[in-house]
Image (cartoon, rainbow, N blue to C red):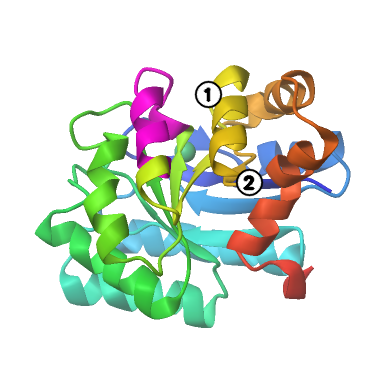
């Protein structure tokens, strides 16, 4: 079993990148039985993000148990619009997580705008994935520590674990907070192995871009992980953190 916790569907209005459905279906063909947690591209208004959330929900309905959704409206929408859309995604569309992108949406994780993101993750009892690495100071992994302590019930997943350059900070964040996890995308095997041994099974396969699937799998399989550690990285931790077991 393979669970990929970080893929996109839709147009990213910050990075001018188009994430197509065919890429996700290609991964299914490449990797039989893969489960993918799908988030939208970065959108800056409610209509765009709602359309992308709806497209993700349609994909989840088309392939039940294979795709799950993650919501990412801009925290700079009005508080009411943000809360309404995230609640709609989780309660009505069945999404399993929320994403916060400090770089793409220009949001410091401890700012006024970001507080509602944490509050909604807490209230709806879903994990919060936060982009880390590129885009400092907002995307610094250590910026998550005070918030992860305040919202100790929220499972926080660092996307990219600091993007190599801030890998040291990613380790410090996991050390400081037992509720901080990470995805494997754009992160070297030796860093992942060190954290796995130091902090236990808190890392999950994330590809971010469809091209990365073979690379991520090869990395996990060739970086000296034990079979049990590989299971943790490839699916076990993700099933538990995103509570997917009942739905597959
Ligand atoms: Zn991403």
Looking at the image, residue 170 sits to the left or right of residue 234; the answer is left
Report which quarter residue 190 is drawn in: top right
Disc 1 designates what residue? 187
The residue furthest right is: 32
- The image position of residue 164, as x and y in percent, is 43, 19
Q: Which residue is mark 2?
A: 201
For disc 2, does the CB lie below 8 Å from ligand 1? no
Residue at left 74%, top 38%? Answer: 229
User: Reading the chain from its start, which is encountered first: label 1 or label 2?
Assistant: 1
Highlighted magenta segment, given as a residue range: 161-174
Disc 2 is placed on an element classified as loop
Q: Secondary structure at mark 1?
A: loop
Q: Confirm whether residue 228 shows in the render.
A: yes
> Relative to residue 7, is residue 54 depicted above or below?
below
Query: Could you tell me how far apart the alpha carbons at marks 1 and 2 are, in whole angstroms?
Result: 16 Å
Image location (x, y in percent) of residue 224: 75, 21
Name the spot of residue 120 as percent of width and height, x first.
33, 73
Vertically, is 98 above or below 143? Answer: below
Q: Residue at x 25, y 57 (%)?
A: 147
**Residue 189 percent across, percent down from the top left:** 62, 21
Crowding at dot 1, Cα within 10 Å, few <14 / some 14-19 / many 20+, comes out as many
């Amino acid at each position: 079993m393979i669970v990929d916790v970080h893929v996109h569907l839709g147009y990213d209005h910050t990075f001018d990148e188009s994430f197509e459905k065919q890429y996700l279906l290609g991964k299914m063909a490449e990797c039989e039985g893969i489960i993918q947690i799908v988030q939208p591209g970065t959108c800056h208004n409610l209509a765009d993000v709602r359309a992308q959330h709806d497209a993700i929900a349609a994909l989840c309905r088309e392939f039940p148990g294979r795709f799950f959704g993650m919501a990412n409206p801009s925290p700079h929408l009005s508080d009411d619009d943000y809360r309404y859309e995230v609640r709609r995604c989780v309660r009505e569309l069945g999404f399993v997580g929320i994403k916060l992108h400090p770089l793409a949406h220009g949001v410091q994780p401890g700012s006024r705008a970001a507080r509602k993101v944490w509050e909604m993750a807490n209230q709806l009892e879903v994990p919060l994935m936060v982009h880390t690495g590129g885009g400092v100071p907002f995307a610094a992994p250590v910026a998550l520590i005070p918030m992860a302590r305040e919202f100790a019930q929220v499972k926080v997943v660092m996307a990219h674990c600091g993007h190599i350059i801030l890998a040291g900070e990613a380790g410090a964040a996991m050390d400081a907070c037992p509720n901080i996890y990470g995805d494997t995308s754009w992160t070297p095997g030796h860093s992942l192995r060190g954290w796995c041994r130091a902090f236990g099974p808190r890392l999950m396969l994330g590809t971010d871009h469809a091209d990365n699937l073979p690379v991520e799998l090869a990395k996990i399989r060739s970086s000296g992980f034990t079979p049990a550690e590989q299971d943790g990285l490839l699916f076990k931790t993700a099933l538990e953190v995103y509570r997917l077991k009942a739905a597959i």
